[in-house]
């Protein structure tokens, strides 16, 4: 299956959205607003066990805000993570499947409600199955350092991701979203898995960045993208959960380095203290900032724009409004 056919669904959405589609925003933040307790190594994936109705509610809120892509609640949902909590493997796999099904159900319900109304500005959203990095599973902040230690090699990373990838794909998402990848090694592992498993739905691979220039590992994005550029299995590349003031220059870097679709969904600019387990006050973007910068990011070359940690449906509504006002 060629590049055109793999990426057609994503390309079609971007075209329908007027050249730049809207990704949803922070998930854990919104769950907490609704009273979910997620101070846990499983993070928002805990709600798959305890509060699945809240997950669906958050998806609906992002659809109402204008999101064209829903990212599932599976970022921190890993089979080893569930098993370590005493959940049998079969049940853990069902929880992974449920993360996709909840998003699909929300999308279908929302679309059925608006598709026949006149003058609505919504698109039928695509569901992207979230696949967090190995560092996200470790829950030790290493997705922001890229330092996995000498014992983690390509095969170990592929083994870690393989079964989760298989389960998520079988659950029927429209896209796959590999998120907060901190180094070239894991990007290569994700790509090789897509090849080995012959995955034929569009994927994006998003890196994090802590200095606004390189991947957290210190490797240049030119190095990280080199291997991805050679494959048609990855439809889009970009940045998530980095501070928003890094994004414009990173888009320009990616634009020089790849012909793939560029996706960006930064956090609000606040800093997470992994030891104290709380958000620290810092240079923060509000919804007005996101509205202004979304236009700049689109004009710089991004074709998928959304938000990550500490952004909300109102943030996404601001982004959606400004990106779609001409269409």
Image (tube, helix red, strand yellow):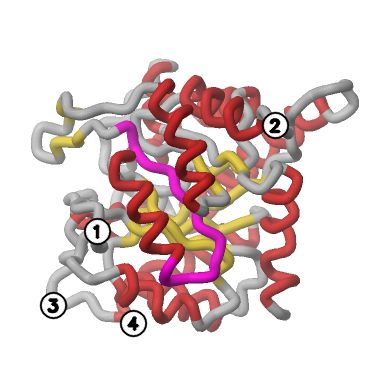
- Point out residue 120 in the picture as x, y percentages from the top left corner: 79, 24
Name the residue at 26% across, 27% down.
284
Label 4 and label 1: CA atoms lie apart by: 28 Å
Q: Is residue 243 left or right of residue 293?
A: left
The quadrant holding residue 207 is bottom left
Counting residues from the start of the chain, the first of labels 2 and 1 encountered is 1
Q: Nearer the viewer, mark 4 or mark 1?
A: 1
Counting residues from the start of the chain, the first of labels 4 and 1 encountered is 4
Whether residue 289 can be seen here: yes
Q: Tell me the quadrant of the picture where the N terminus can be found.
A: bottom right
* Location of mark 1 (residue): 213
**Magenta-span inclusion, residue 7:** no
* Location of mark 4 (residue): 155
Contact, CB < 8 Å: mark 1 with mark 3? no
* Location of mark 2 (residue): 326
Counting residues from the start of the chain, the first of labels 3 and 4 encountered is 3
Q: What segment carries the magenta color?
A: 256-268
Q: Residues within 10 Å of mark 3 (few under 14, many from 20)?
A: few
Label 2 and label 1: CA atoms lie apart by: 32 Å
Counting residues from the start of the chain, the first of labels 1 and 3 encountered is 3
Counting residues from the start of the chain, the first of labels 2 and 4 encountered is 4
Counting residues from the start of the chain, the first of labels 2 and 3 encountered is 3
SS at mark 3?
loop
Label 1 and label 3: CA atoms lie apart by: 24 Å
* Location of mark 3 (residue): 150
SS at mark 1?
loop
Name the residue at 17% across, 58% down.
145
């Amino acid at each position: 299956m060629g590049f055109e056919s793999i990426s057609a669904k994503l390309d079609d959405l971007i075209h329908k959205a007027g050249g730049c589609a809207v990704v949803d925003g922070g998930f854990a933040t919104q769950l907490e607003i609704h009273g979910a307790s997620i101070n846990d190594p499983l993070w928002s994936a805990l709600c798959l066990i305890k509060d699945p109705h809240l997950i669906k509610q958050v998806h609906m809120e992002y659809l109402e805000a204008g999101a064209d892509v829903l990212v599932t609640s599976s970022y921190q949902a890993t089979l080893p993570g569930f098993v370590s909590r005493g959940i049998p493997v079969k049940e853990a796999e069902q929880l992974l499947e449920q993360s996709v099904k909840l998003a699909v159900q929300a999308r279908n319900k929302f679309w059925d409600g608006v598709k026949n109304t006149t003058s609505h500005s919504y698109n039928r959203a695509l569901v992207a199955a979230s696949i967090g990095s190995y560092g996200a599973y470790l829950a030790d902040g290493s997705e922001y350092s890229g330092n996995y230690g000498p014992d983690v090699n390509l095969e170990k990373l592929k083994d870690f991701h393989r079964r989760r990838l298989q389960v998520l794909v079988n659950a029927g998402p429209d896209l796959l979203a590999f998120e907060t990848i901190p180094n070239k090694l894991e990007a290569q592992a994700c790509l090789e898995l897509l090849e080995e498993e012959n995955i034929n739905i569009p994927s994006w691979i998003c890196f994090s960045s802590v200095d606004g220039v390189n991947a957290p590992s210190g490797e240049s994005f030119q190095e990280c993208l080199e291997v991805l550029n050679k494959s048609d299995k990855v439809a889009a590349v970009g940045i998530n959960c980095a501070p928003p003031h890094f994004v414009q220059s990173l888009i320009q870097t990616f634009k020089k380095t790849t012909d793939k679709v560029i996706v960006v969904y930064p956090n609000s600019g606040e800093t997470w203290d992994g030891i104290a387990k709380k958000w620290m006050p810092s240079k923060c973007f509000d919804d007005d900032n996101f509205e202004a910068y979304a236009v700049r990011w689109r004009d710089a070359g991004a074709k998928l724009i959304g938000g990550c940690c500490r952004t909300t449906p109102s943030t996404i509504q601001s982004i959606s409004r400004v990106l779609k006002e001409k269409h």
